[in-house]
Amino acid sequence: MPGRRLTQVAAVVLILGLAGCVFEQIGRYRDRSRFKQIGRSVNIGGRTLNLSCVGQGSPTVVFDTYGHQSGYSWVAVQSAVAKYTRACWYDRAGYGWSELGPSPRTFQSVASDLHALLQEAGIPSPIVLVGAGDAASHIRVYSGSYPTEVGGIVMLDGNDVDDPALQISDSEKGGFQRLFGTWAPGARRTLCRTQPLLGAAGILRLASLFGKPRKTNSFGLTPEQHAELDYLSDNGTTLQATEVCAREESMRQVRAAGGLRSVPLVVIVSKTGRHGSTSQDLTEAEEKNRVGKVSNALAGLSTNGRVVLIEGDLKPEAIVRSILDVLQTDQGSK
């Protein structure tokens, strides 16, 4: 009798596991097909990433994203830049219309994916890289790995994640830090070890049905476009694409990447602050560190770097101006 019961339990577990796997695969397909694809799928070796390019000219401007963010967030700025040169955005692995990649995801994983994507898509170097928040770290790792392929950089409210002494305000902390405090790294590592299995079995997707959608940041999108961005950036598939699990390793990769040599670099810092928080959310010391120390440290990575301070909300026009400045500087240095 005990043996028969054990067999029954094993059969139930197997059936539930298979059902979960089917549920997950259907969910991934629906996540990518809910909205008509903008761009094209490029095979980078057994999986595809979504790439959208418009305009003509050289060098190509490539927009990167961070956190739970589809590349679609850049579509308005891309259209403006495309009046002057070719402009492209892409979806990192697991976001938008891109397929999931191997985990854990590090900043080097992101940089390697982008390099393979540009190679397969036939986009020549040098390129101009543009990114906000943690995308500044993606860019630094990319530049360190492929130094001859970067002709210019624009960072928007970039994070200085390689500074272990950098204090993070409560308004900027993620859910793990707020919930677990100093225990957050250990709790995150424990969950991350089981993430691939939980994702493949559909458990993370099931859990996402009970969560609240996370808001995304963008520049110049209409309300309808932003609603689409929110879904492309936060669904059952994107939960499995996070770079949080390998945060410490990513920080080491940023430090190992070194400086940016003499690459034309503009670091934009806005009074609004990153992640949409206002300066009132930060203490005076935190705001001074964010606007002064961090931005100047990033600009100092290049002998051709400078800071642009925006007094208020960061509008697409200001971003486009800085991109054009970098393009002109790059052309003038040739």
Image (tube, rainbow, N blue to C red):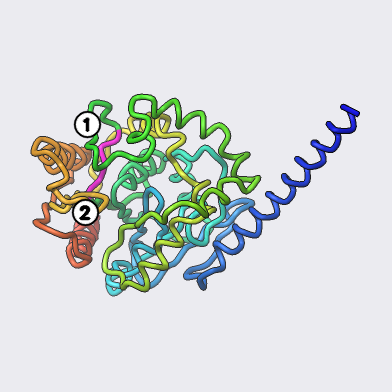
* Circle 2 Cα neighbour tier, 10 Å, few/some/many (<14 / 14–19 / ≥20): few
User: For residue 333, which numbered disc appears in the image?
Assistant: 2
Instruction: Pinpoint residue 99: horizontal percent, then vertical percent.
Output: 56, 55
Quarter of the rendering containing residue 326: bottom left
The residue closer to the viewer here, 264 or 129, is 129
What residue is drawn where x is 60% and y is 45%?
203
- Left or right of 256 in this view: 44: right
Can residue 264 be seen here? The reply is no
Q: Is residue 128 above or below residue 222?
A: above
Instruction: Pinpoint residue 228: horizontal percent, then vertical percent.
Output: 42, 68
- Residue ID for mark 1: 167
- Left or right of 162 in this view: 53: right
- Left or right of 93 in this view: 297: left
- Left or right of 267 in this view: 4: right
The residue closer to the viewer here, 146 or 254, is 254
Instruction: Pinpoint residue 58: horizontal percent, then vertical percent.
Output: 34, 65
Please name the predominant secondary structure of the magenta segment in the image.
loop
Quarter of the rendering containing residue 225: bottom left
Q: Is residue 138 magenta?
A: no
Circle 2 or circle 1, nearest the eye: 1
What residue is drawn where x is 45% and y is 45%?
110
Span colored in magenta: 157-161
